[in-house]
Amino acid sequence: MEIQNYLTTAKGKINNKPVKTFILAILAGVFIALAAVLSVVASVSMHGYSAAKLMGAIVFPIGLMLVILMKTELFTGNSLLVIPLLKKDIKLKQLLKNWFIVYLGNLVGSLVIALMISNTPLKDIVANSFIKITNTKISLSFLSSIILGILCNFLVCLAVFLSSNTKTIGEKIIVIFLPIFTFVALSFEHSVANMAYLSLGYLFDNSISIGKILLNNLLPVTIGNIIGGSLLGIIIYYLRKE
């Protein structure tokens, strides 16, 4: 498996104007947030932990499918930009700039969907689930959140990389579905998805601490996502190094 296809994609990401990158990142945030809501709706009436997790895991991959097929900008997937960084095709400053813009854009997209969903009849169906999910996530230890973030983005970036080496939409759907299904079923932590989960949890229960949302979850999960995605990128680079 070659890295050239991904390098071509990465070059386009880095060369995009900041405004375009930000808009594409907002769209990615919207797609992932909608997938998060869909996963809760699909599993809300399921009895038993395993059944609920598996049902949510079956539908959540739709989010990354839309991200990839629409060629938008997702912070977690862009951890793979370490590959062109290692090849010295891009500079560290360019990578960090992309991550910053994309993270903010993903957050905006997630917040937009959270605010919209909280003002629809869906809130009566999913509110308790999002509150429970949020409380569970902010109760994780800092270390656990980092580890779960590492495992999650290792799989997400695997899906992103594999999709860059496929040609048909059907092939992309398959290689995206399997890793994403796995991380959701195993309750790994995805920073962009958590932007939606935690925002909705807060909107449905204002007693939830914003400080805990940021420090107990988003911060360590983001760190873990960067480590996990970058680790896969480093492995891919050295395995395919010419």
Image: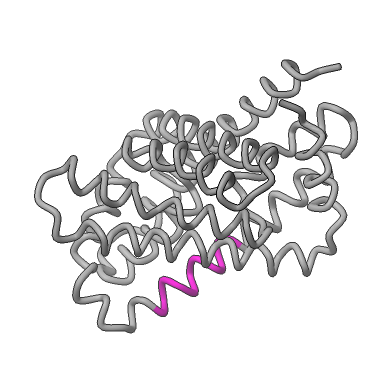
The tally of labels here is 0
Relative to 6, 46 lies left or right? left
Give the extent of the magenta segment: 106-116
- Between 178 and 202, the residue placed more toward the observer is 178
Residue placed at 82% from the left, 38% from the top? 92
- Between 35 and 132, the residue placed more toward the observer is 35
Residue 130 position, x and y percent, is 27, 61
Q: Quadrant of residue 59?
A: bottom left
Vertical placement of residue 95 versus 131, above or below: above
Quarter that holds the C terminus:
top right
Magenta stretch, main secondary structure, is helix
Residue 17 position, x and y percent, is 84, 64
Residue furthest left as drawn: 47
Residue placed at 54% from the left, 38% from the top? 225
Relative to 152, 186 lies left or right? left
Residue 177 position, x and y percent, is 46, 44
Residue 158 position, x and y percent, is 57, 34
